[in-house]
Amino acid sequence: MEVANELMVRGIVVGVFQENCWVIGSRQTSEAICIDPGDQPDEVLALARDMGVTIKYIANSHAHVDHILGVAGVHRATNAKFLLHEDDLDLLRTGWQSSAEKFGFDVNDPPPDPSAFVTDGDIVEVAGLRLRAITTPGHTPGSVSYYADEGLLFSGDTLFRGSIGRTDFPGGNLDQEMTSICDKLLELPDDTTVLPGHMQQTTIGFEREHNPFVADWLRKQAD
């Protein structure tokens, strides 16, 4: 995907949970940001090489096991700064381990602690590319979405095409998630392309009109 002939955006589906990892690079400077390297770090690094970019930041939407198992490998190979919201720090350090054990993962390369924390409104920037962090708690306490001014939203597991992220895991909160979606993400332009953590892309306008969870929530708020 090319955006305004300046950005390159490519995704790779990794791991048994079929998680979408995204690499966003500047065509002018060849610097990049990687969002959610959930597994298979060698493949993520190969994608960056194929794009001709160098990953400078790893920006995670949250710290569930299917989004963090590739962080260590990408971080070690690139020395990229690893960013996460502080409210997901406990999940990063220990919370994913029960999921790893449940699904039989043999994790020999656990994720490092973040290089820095992000919060609402922070700008993650490399030369020729900037993303704005939007805190979207609900799926996890520290869930974050990232918005590019070129009309791209990386929504993690907060918003999917016709659906939303699960809130029945520890730390999940449905009211928080729907507030994040309806009060923050739906404020973006309708033509914003949404690139989620799983499944296919969508747009803000499509979700406003067709997402049943959004329609149900807005109807309840109006009652």
Image (cartoon, rainbow, N blue to C red):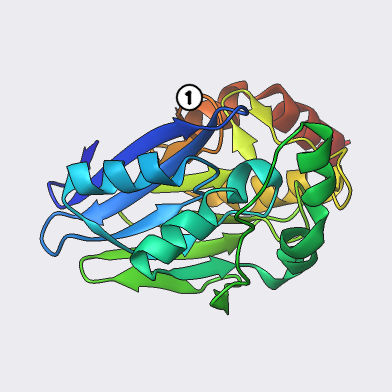
Is residue 4 something that shows in the picture?
Answer: yes
Identity of the residue furthest to the bottom in this view: 116
For the C terminus, give its image quadrant.
top right
Is residue 186 something that shows in the picture?
Answer: no
- Of residues 122 and 30, the one nearer the viewer is 30
The correct choice, above or below, for 216 with respect to 74 in the image is: above
Q: Is residue 120 left or right of residue 166?
A: left
Badge 1 crowding class, 10 Å Cα cut-off, few under 14, some 14 to 19, many 20 or more, is few
Q: Which residue is mark 1?
A: 200
Q: Is residue 104 left or right of residue 125?
A: right
Q: Position of residue 188 (x, y in %)?
A: 48, 49
- Amino acid marked by disc 1: Gln
The correct choice, above or below, for 74 with respect to 170 in the image is: below
Q: Position of residue 44 (x, y in %)?
A: 38, 44
Q: To which quarter of the image does residue 77 belong?
A: bottom left
- Of residues 128 and 204, the one nearer the viewer is 128
Q: Is residue 40 left or right of residue 89?
A: left
Q: Residue at x 43, y 56 (%)?
A: 74
Q: Residue at x 57, y 61 (%)?
A: 134
Q: Residue at x 79, y 50 (%)?
A: 97
The number of discs equals 1
For the N terminus, give its image quadrant.
top left
Q: Position of residue 145 (x, y in %)?
A: 55, 54
Q: Position of residue 110 (x, y in %)?
A: 64, 57
Q: Residue at x 53, y 25 (%)?
A: 199
The correct choice, above or below, for 26 with respect to 122 in the image is: above
